[in-house]
């Protein structure tokens, strides 16, 4: 049986998504209905999310890790597709959606706070202070993990970026500077590789609202609370 817009909207309301809120979504279309069989496809999910927050702001990470390949075309925020899943890609091209200009870790947003969220995106520590994720933290956004786990929650990279003991790595990507293509190298928080993020999610436990959106298991959390919890974890464990 297909999952339709009315059911998705009702499920979003039941888990606690509120009108006027700022909502960050990490998602898996296939988890919502078997074989991705959502009536109307990805557009139905995006439309339901927009309706659920009414006049709020919707945001989704729109990362493009393939742009790190030396032979890749330089990132173009108007054309480069995201690899964050079908829902995120549909939202990227949705009318009124804005996108930050980072070659690897761009963020899309639509709504009253979209311009502020996407206006600036530092190249180094792209998920840390000054980034769209910091703006979302300042707005005390709600994070919806829709059919995915805490290992997909970018707010945990932001939390780790605030820790003095943060893990770091160097990221490289091609960029056009003064009409010349060149490779850029900048520091960033390291990939977690399912080392700490799932543990944080498990320990966070009942502080998250949990339910189902269609057939997908979902969690709704406050970004400020999760970041404070995760930062304390990183400060103790790393």
Image (cartoon, grey):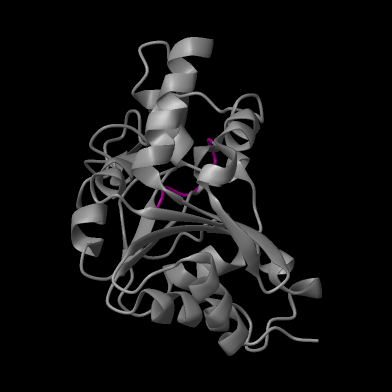
Above or below residue 70? Residue 77 is below
Camera-nearest residue between 220 and 33:
220
Most frequent secondary structure within the magenta stretch? loop
Q: Is residue 73 shown in magenta? A: yes
Is residue 229 among the parts visible in the rendering?
yes
> Looking at the rendering, in which quadrant would you find the N terminus?
bottom right
Quadrant location of residue 205?
top right
Q: Which residues are magenta?
A: 70-75
Quadrant location of residue 191?
top right
Is residue 180 among the parts visible in the rendering?
no
Q: Is residue 225 shown in magenta? A: no
Spot occupied by residue 78 in the image (x, y as percentages of width and height): 36, 65
Q: What residue is at 25 percent from the left and 46 percent from the top?
A: 135
Above or below residue 234? Residue 100 is below
Spot occupied by residue 224 in the image (x, y as percentages of width and height): 34, 41
Q: How many marks?
A: 0
Spot occupied by residue 204 in the image (x, y as percentages of width and height): 55, 36
Camera-nearest residue between 36 and 177:
36
Q: What residue is at 22 percent from the left and 62 percent from the top?
A: 113
Q: What residue is at 52 percent from the left and 81 percent from the top?
A: 9
Spot occupied by residue 211 in the image (x, y as percentages of width and height): 63, 62
Above or below residue 89? Residue 43 is below
Task: Give the side of residue 91 with respect to residue 78, left or right.
Answer: right
Seen as rendered, the residue at the extreme front is: 206
Camera-nearest residue between 95 and 68:
95
Camera-nearest residue between 93 and 165:
165
Task: Give the side of residue 34 with respect to residue 235, left or right.
Answer: right
Above or below residue 200? Residue 169 is above
Task: Give the side of residue 33 with respect to residue 102, left or right.
Answer: right
Q: What residue is at 37 percent from the left and 36 percent from the top?
A: 127
């Amino acid at each position: 049986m297909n999952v339709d817009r009315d059911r998705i909207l009702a499920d979003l309301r039941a888990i606690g998504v509120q009108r006027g809120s700022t909502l960050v979504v990490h998602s898996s279309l296939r988890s919502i209905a078997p074989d991705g069989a959502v009536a109307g496809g990805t557009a139905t999910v995006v439309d339901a999310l927009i309706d659920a927050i009414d006049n709020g702001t919707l945001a989704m990470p729109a990362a493009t890790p393939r742009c790190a390949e030396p032979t890749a075309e330089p990132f173009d925020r108007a054309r480069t597709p995201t690899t964050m899943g079908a829902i995120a890609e549909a939202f990227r091209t949705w009318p009124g959606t804005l996108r930050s200009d980072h070659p690897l870790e761009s963020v899309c947003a639509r709504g009253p706070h979209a311009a502020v969220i996407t206006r600036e995106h530092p190249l180094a520590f792209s998920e840390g202070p000054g980034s769209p994720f910091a703006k979302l933290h300042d707005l005390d956004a709600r994070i919806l993990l829709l059919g995915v786990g805490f290992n997909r929650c970018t707010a945990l990279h932001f939390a780790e970026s605030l820790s003095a003991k943060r893990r770091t790595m160097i990221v490289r990507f091609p960029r056009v500077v003064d009409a010349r293509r060149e490779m850029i190298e900048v520091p960033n928080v390291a990939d977690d590789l399912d080392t700490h993020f799932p543990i944080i999610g498990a320990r966070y436990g009942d502080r998250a609202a949990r339910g189902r959106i269609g057939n997908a298991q979902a969690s709704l959390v406050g970004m400020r609370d999760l970041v404070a919890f995760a930062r304390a974890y990183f400060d103790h464990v790393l």
